[in-house]
Amino acid sequence: MQRVVKVTNDYIAEAILQKFPESIRSIEESYATLDIVVAKEKIIEIITWFKTHEVLQFNFLTSLCGVHFPDKKDEELSVVYHMHSFINNIRLRIHVFLPISLPEIPTLTGVFAGANWMERETFEFYGVKFDGHPDLRIILNEESMTYHPLRKEYPLIDDSRTDKDDKYFGR
C-alpha cells in the first residue's frame, strides 16, 4: 500500500534542504507560497528534481521572469521560476540572483520546452543570457535596441517635459 503524503510548504522545505543543503541560500514563505533562493550552478538540477520527484511532482512551469534590484551589490538581477504541482495543488517560487556584470544562467529549455519564450523575454528586457538556449534573440522590441528596458536604470519622470502637470496624476 502506498503511503499518502500531505505536501505542505514545510514538507517541501525539508525535502529540498535534505537533497541540496549546500545549494539553498534561503527559504521563506510569502503569501502562503514558498520562496527558495538557490545557487545558479544547481538551478537545472534542482528544477529537474522538483519536476521528477515522486511525491512533489512540480510538473508545470507557470512563469519565468526577471527582476532588477539596482541596490543589491553583485545580485542586481534575479531570475524567478514559478512552478506548480497540479497533483498536490501547491505552488513555489525559485529565485536565482546574478551580478549585472555577468548575467548568465543555464537554459531551462531542456527541462521545460515552454521556458523558451519566457527566457527570450527575460533576455530582451533584463539582459540575462541563458547559456545553451536554442534561439536567444529579441522578439518583442526593435532589433536596434541596445539596452534592456525593464532594468531600473532610467528615470521615471522626464524633467524636460513641459506639457505634463503632476496635479492631474495625483501628485
Image (cartoon, helix red, strand yellow):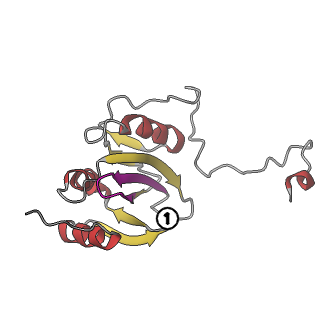
Residue drawn at (33%, 35%) of the image: 133
Of 33 and 87, the residue lying toward us: 87
Q: Which of the 4 image quarters holds residue 85?
A: bottom left
Residue 139 percent across, percent down from the top left: 50, 28
Q: Which residue is denoted by mark 1 in the rendering? A: 73
Residue 32 percent across, percent down from the top left: 45, 68
Identified by mark 1, the residue type is Lys
The secondary structure that most of the magenta stretch takes on is strand
Residue 79 painted magenta: yes
Q: Residues within 10 Å of mark 1 (few under 14, many from 20)?
A: few
Does any portion of residue 21 appear in the rendered image? no
Residue 131 percent across, percent down from the top left: 32, 40
Residue lying at the far front in this picture: please name it: 1
Of 153 and 40, the residue lying toward us: 40
Total tally of numbered discs in the picture: 1
Residue drawn at (20%, 51%) of the image: 52
Query: Quadrant where the N terminus lies?
Result: bottom left
Residue lying at the far left in this picture: please name it: 1
Query: Quadrant where the C terminus lies?
Result: bottom right
Per the rendered image, the range of residues in magenta is 77-95
Residue drawn at (78%, 50%) of the image: 157
Examine the rendered structure and indicate whether residue 85 appears above or below residue 123. below
The answer to whether 119 appears left or right of 44 in the picture is right
Q: Which of the 4 image quarters holds residue 70?
A: bottom right
